[in-house]
Image (cartoon, rainbow, N blue to C red):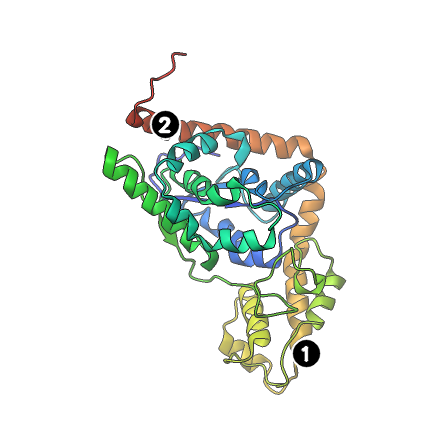
Amino acid sequence: MEQNTERKKVIFSGIQPTGVFTLGNYLGAIKNWKELQEDYNCIFSVVDLHAITVRQDPAALRKQTLDSVALLLASGIDPQKSVLFMQSHNSAHAELSWVLSCYTQFGELSRMTQFKDKSQRHADNINAGLFTYPVLMAADILLYKTDLVPVGVDQKQHLELARNIAERFNGVYGNVFTVPEPYIPKISAKVMSLADPEKKMSKSDENINGFISLLDDRDTIIRKFKRAVTDSDTCVRYAEGKSGINNLMSIYSSVSGKDFAAIEKEFEGKGYGDFKLCVGECVADALAPIREEFAKLSKDKAYLMSVCSEGAQFARRLSRRTLEKVYHKVGFVKAEN
């Protein structure tokens, strides 16, 4: 990343390497990340430490982590403008997480809805990491004096906890942490499952027709959209009770840039079949360059590792200042080099 003396606000965001990203990941986060690079100092991390709260196959995790880096680069993350690194390559995340866990109340973590949800889904592995996961997330954010964190609905609670921890620590030791604010994009899509539009699109969906992978080929994308669940109406309009069509309209709007009024006018007098085909073709066209660039980048492990190595070095320099200040404040004796 190029050094920039201008004081831009800092944005931190992370994404787990637990499989190929979906259209939901792209429209809800990654597409916005690409645009944020122009106006903010962006720090993006593939958060592999978070991934192991669920048991992972080691070889698969390594491949998925590198694939995640390649997909982010293919999606427009520019290592000359942003910091991109693997979370496990900066030990400050784990170190700060321990200190912050001593300033986090058990009751606060008990109220985290994602812990409750994941405990139900992984009842055979309710581990301590799953419980303290939000503290590590707070460390991710607070290490870099982050001003803004892009958040979806399911992460607002975690950001609020990070804010509470920062304010609690600052209340004891003075102005140590920047208290982060949520960043709500002007245009943000919450993409729902194509098979069940009441549920968020997820790569863990047992129905493969429910999600679009960024690496799905054109025919697969169009076929999945043709099979998307809609309703018994035939009119393309955004309205209560039309969750399937509302979801397709949101996707089409995010990809094409057209608002709902323009979409309704475009498909006036046309049926759902025409609409679903159009959305599928539009999404396929948008994802084709990403898939092609990924195919090139994924074969160049040396380049991917060089990007992550440079990003990790930059991240370590930034975070070391914060960690040293925290260690001094809590009373640790500074190590002699």
Residue 166 rendering spot, x and y as whole percentages: 32, 41
Judge from the rendering whether residue 234 lies leftward or rightward of residue 38; answer left or right.
right
Counting residues from the start of the chain, the first of labels 1 and 2 encountered is 1
Label 1 and label 2: CA atoms lie apart by 56 Å
Q: Quadrant of residue 175?
A: top left
Q: Is residue 291 visible?
A: yes
Judge from the rendering whether residue 300 lies leftward or rightward of residue 38; answer left or right.
right
The secondary element bearing badge 2 is classed as helix
Front residue of 335/277: it is 335
Question: Residue furthest toward the top?
Answer: 336
- Residue shown at 51%/40% (left/top)? 128
Quarter containing the C terminus: top left
The secondary element bearing badge 1 is classed as helix
Q: Is residue 39 visible?
A: no
At label 2, the amino acid type is: Arg
Would you name the residue on which mark 1 appears?
Answer: 274
